[in-house]
Image (cartoon, rainbow, N blue to C red):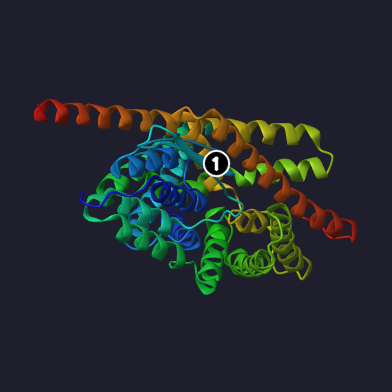
Amino acid sequence: MGYKCSEYEVLELVSFVGKLYLKNGAEVYKTEEIICNVGQHFGYNVETFSTLTCIVVSLSGRDKEYRSKVTRINARDLNIQKLHLVNKLTNEIDNYTYKDFYREILKINDNYFLEFHRYVIGCIIVGISFGIVFGGGKPEAITGGFGGLFLSLATSLFNKYNINGVLVNIAGGAACTTVACTATYLGYTTKTSIIIVGCLMILVPGLAFANSMRDFIAGDLIAGSSRLMEVIMIATSLSVGVGLVAKIFTLMGGVIY
Amino acid sequence: MIIQFIFSILSVIGFTIIFNVRGKIAFWSALGGGIGWIIYLFTKKIGFSLGVSFFLAGSWITFVSQLIAIYFKTPVTSALIPTLTPLVPGGGAYYTMFYLLNEDYDLALTKGTETIVVCGAIILGFLTVSEIFRLYLLRKKRIEKIKKQ
């Protein structure tokens, strides 16, 4: 390596990589591993402590003084394509100089978003297929598709205005329950529960569940238990949303099968 | 059962679209997820208990996603999340809530216990297979180190 980068530059790069990786749904222990690897590649001894909401990186400089940087993470979304690309980039780190590497990372950060139409199509597919997988027929599948459509519209509308996660999940649960209850009221289907469960699978915290298990297994108890709290919070807010609409529907005289 | 297989593959494809997994990884994880759901259905049909069938399905899914991760050089998460999400007991949690709403506490307790058992079974299957893989990778690394010296 001809070009020696300063402590400041490495700290900036390393915390940016960590933030990008953690924000898009990686496990905490994996993030720490990647931060240490990138730092060591640029010739510094880097140690880090991360939780779900903040990353602390400390680095021992050449002049025998310690530098550190705290990065807060206030937004979280799911984008596995970005995870895959960052992982690929850090595996091939030997081919890049410092500046190229930073440019590539910035490029990943600014591109590869999940388009709106893809999200809607995905939700509709999940709604339709779970209507049949859980033992329904054609009417359940069609109603499930409409449930997925309304759920995706509701959640993306709420996400657009940065409303917090609990309210988004309540809105999503309420939207799909409304569709299922309306279909039952019109006499189109008799398996309301199957439709509701099928649409709810879109919002079920699969990522948080998987990541909390993986963090627990890797020995990171703090990250694992905070992810577990996220699972419980999402599940509670979903059931509040569903329960609200279901209770109103039964009070109005409808029956949920 | 064939219809179930096709639609469980479709559901995993839906999740890969939502979570933005692309290309070959999405295809292979969809196939693996469909087979996982069939394993659960089949073992339930021949009379295994709920815990055992979810244990088998969970370990199969972990196995597939570890293989995909090694083959396509991607983090395990990218294959694991879309395949695992259909197995998460959302139905059990929903029914628990539903019976609680109707003040039917006996049924709610039964469903709640069932949900916890399913969660535990998936975690156990996941743990076994990923531990085996971790030991295998450690061994491979050690052998490479010895060869280098």
Q: Position of residue B134 (x, y in %)?
A: 32, 30
- Residue that label 1 marks: A209
Give the farthest residue toward the front. Answer: A63
Can see residue B122?
Answer: no
Would residue B146 appear left or right of B85 to someone viewing this image?
A: left
- How many discs mark residues in the rendered view? 1
Quadrant of the snapshot with the C terminus of chain B: top left
Q: Residue at x 37, y 54 (%)?
A: A86
- The vertical placement of B102 against A125, above or below, is above
Q: Residue at x 53, y 33 (%)?
A: B50
- Between A8 and A192, the residue placed more toward the observer is A8
- The vertical placement of A161 against A33, above or below, is below
Q: Residue at x 42, y 47 (%)?
A: A14
Q: Position of residue B115 (x, y in %)?
A: 62, 36
Q: Position of residue B128 (x, y in %)?
A: 39, 28
Quadrant housing residue A127: bottom right
- Between B80 and A94, the residue placed more toward the observer is A94
- Between A117 and A110, the residue placed more toward the observer is A110
- Chain holding disc 1: A
Would residue A83 appear left or right of A129 to someone viewing this image?
A: left
Under mark 1, the amino acid is Phe
- The vertical placement of B113 against A153, above or below, is above
Can see residue A193?
Answer: yes
Mark 1 is surrounded, within 10 Å at the Cα level, by few (under 14), some (14 to 19) or many (20 or more) other residues, namely: many
Q: Residue at x 78, y 51 (%)?
A: A243
User: At numbered mark 1, what does the secondary structure look like: helix, strand or loop?
Assistant: helix
Q: Position of residue B39 (x, y in %)?
A: 41, 42
